[in-house]
Amino acid sequence: MRKFSASLLAVLGLALLGQPAAAQEKYPSKPTRIIVPYAPGGATDIVSRIVGDQLKNILGQAFVTENKPGAFGIIAIEEMARSKPDGYTLMVGNVTTNTITPILHAKKFSINYEKEVIPVARLVDIPAFLIVTTRDFPVKSLAELVDYAKKNKGKVRYGHVGVGSYPHYDMEVFAKRAGIELVAIPNKAGASGILKDMATGDIQVSFLNVASSAALIKAGQIRPIAVVNPTRLPEYPDVPTMAELGYPGVGTLAWQGMFAPAGTPKEVLDTLTKAILQALEAPAAKEVFAKQYFNIVPTKSVEEAKAWLAEDMANWKKITEEVKIDLTE
């Protein structure tokens, strides 16, 4: 009897091994966490929560944002990359954390970023203004800014959110192309700190995203003289693009994207991509993004996302080689 039972169990075991697909659960079968490399409230956090809410509606499981700020985004990236590659730990990052940081701070990583992280999808782009203060500053156009800076060498101050940040590079690239010298003033308080300094005239010029700038533009305390965007914005039809003004490629459309650990199964990535495309077309998501002036620009497949990220990293490698910034400032 014992011999018969053992034989029967062996046969049943082989039968089960022959049907692995039937035992696998369809993704997602439990909540997924989305790691964000910033504190709550910023653009990346907003994008993660909006997309996560829609993914829950589409896929029937919660997508919960977890904020892991610090170390230029490295903390969040490494936690995500070391997670089990099953689709249940993702990350929403941006051009700073997922392109510039791996280039400028490669030695600070304990992982191989380009081999252990894969892009799932590009989500949105965030247009920016080149803005000037109206406080004791006569400049009303980009041409006037260049002319004023040439006549007042080393006296025009610009604000940025941190050494090696994309607004820092953007302004240095602009200054180099325009043949002018500007004084960099970092502001640890971020966009709100820069806006405060612009309103008082402590700094005269900066690149800043459109949504953050809107209130002070309306109040007449700052003036947009160019927009970083493929086209003019309908809400600001008189503000020309940087390309129109002779500076194509200057300024950053601050993209936001979703990432996963390398090795995540293709079927999981395909499920996520399909759901993300639906999520970004949801009326609730489109309404929020429109109010923030975010452009919805999703990639259509993981292969397209990989090609996009590779191109962006190649572009930023050129920028960081063209403009040398002392990262110890």
Image (tube, helix red, strand yellow):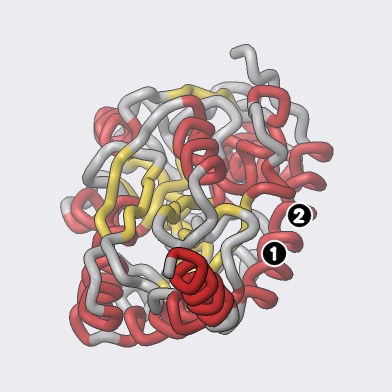
Which numbered mark, 2 or 1, is in the foreground of this view? 2
Mark 1 secondary-structure assignment: loop
Q: Residue placed at 53% from the left, 60% from the top?
A: 253
> Label for residue 315?
2
Percent position of residue 181, x then y = 67, 29
Q: Is residue 34 left or right of residue 329?
A: left
Mark 1 residue crowding within 10 angstroms, few (<14) / some (14–19) / many (20+)? few
Q: Residue placed at 45% from the left, 57% from the top?
A: 128
Q: Find out whether the residues at labels 2 and 1 contact each other: C-beta distance under 8 Å.
A: no
Quadrant for the C terminus, please: top right
Q: Is residue 224 left or right of residue 319?
A: left
Image quarter for residue 249?
A: bottom right
Percent position of residue 35, x then y = 38, 47
Q: Earlier in the sequence, mark 2 or mark 1?
A: 1
Quadrant for the N terminus, please: bottom left
Relative to 136, is 230 above or below? below
Of residues 94 and 186, the one nearer the viewer is: 94
